[in-house]
């Protein structure tokens, strides 16, 4: 039943890869002009931080990285973690989020370009727990403002196409244990994403 979402994610990653390769083949490096945008997609594996275990899913990125800002730019991303649950996790465990903020890319060293970022966004979490009064399993949903710190490395394959390895540490504030209405405090999901990023219109990413 989950084949179609996974197939869709795989097609998204492949589309980024194919678009970048095609773009690189039809334009010489000196002709790469236009809005300095990066777009990408990848596969994510995260520790959901509560209901221990792991979750898998997909991430998409978009970045605005003007050369005149000397490495500073704006990033927006979205992630949906809804697959590969640990056997100990609730069957409905899911985390999805969308966030944006500042990214800084250091100058490339050979084919490597490290970066760091700070993002703020909105997260949704589905889970379940036993109600101590009724002894029944209750499903619930939380939505929260989240903050994210992270970073990673882009590795240039060719022209506009880069492979990305990304790490994030998230803070979800003031979650509530719904069956008894008791705050459980912040949780800190964290994990890695591997995927492709294609940079258009910024020659600093093609040296």
Image: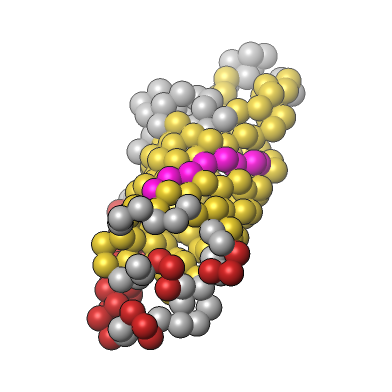
Task: Identify the residue at horizontal 52%, vertical 27% (top origin).
Answer: 49
In the image, 71: left or right of 133?
A: left
- Dividing the picture into quadrants, the one containing residue 178 is top right
Whether residue 205 is in magenta: the answer is no
| Count of marks, rendered view | 0
Which quadrant of the rendered structure holds the C terminus? Answer: bottom left
Task: Identify the residue at horizontal 61%, vertical 46% (top origin).
Answer: 118
In the image, 132: left or right of 47?
A: right
Which one is nearer the viewer's eye here, 31 or 184? 31
Expressed as whole percent of the image width and height from the top left, the position of residue 205 reads: 40, 66
Expressed as whole percent of the image width and height from the top left, the position of residue 201 reads: 46, 77
The vertical placement of 68 against 58, above or below, is below
Which one is nearer the viewer's eye here, 188 or 126? 188
The vertical placement of 92 against 137, above or below, is below
- Dividing the picture into quadrants, the one containing residue 107 is bottom left
Q: Is any part of residue 155 visible from this angle? A: yes
> What residue span does the magenta drawing correspond to?
146-154
Q: Is any part of residue 77 visible from this angle? A: no
Whether residue 153 is in magenta: the answer is yes
Which one is nearer the viewer's eye here, 134 or 82? 82
Task: Identify the residue at horizontal 40%, vertical 81% (top origin).
Answer: 32
């Amino acid at each position: 039943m989950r084949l179609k979402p996974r197939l869709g994610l795989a097609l998204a990653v492949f589309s980024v890869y194919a678009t970048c390769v095609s773009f690189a083949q039809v334009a010489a490096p000196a002709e790469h002009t236009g809005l300095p945008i990066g777009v990408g997609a990848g596969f994510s594996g995260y520790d959901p931080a509560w209901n221990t275990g792991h979750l898998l899913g997909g991430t998409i990125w978009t970045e605005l990285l003007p050369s005149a800002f000397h490495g500073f730019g704006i990033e927006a991303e979205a992630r949906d973690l809804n697959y590969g649950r640990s056997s100990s996790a609730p069957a409905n465990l899911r985390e999805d989020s969308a966030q944006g903020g500042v990214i800084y890319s250091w100058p490339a060293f050979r084919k490597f370009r490290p970066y760091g970022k700070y993002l703020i966004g909105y997260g949704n979490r589905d889970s379940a727990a036993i109600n101590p009064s009724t002894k029944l399993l209750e499903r619930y949903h939380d939505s929260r403002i989240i903050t994210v710190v992270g970073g990673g490395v882009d590795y240039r394959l060719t022209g506009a196409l880069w492979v990305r390895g990304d790490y994030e540490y998230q803070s979800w504030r003031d979650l509530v244990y719904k069956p008894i209405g008791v705050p459980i405090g912040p949780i800190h999901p964290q994990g890695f994403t591997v995927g492709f990023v294609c940079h258009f219109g910024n020659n600093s990413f093609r040296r």
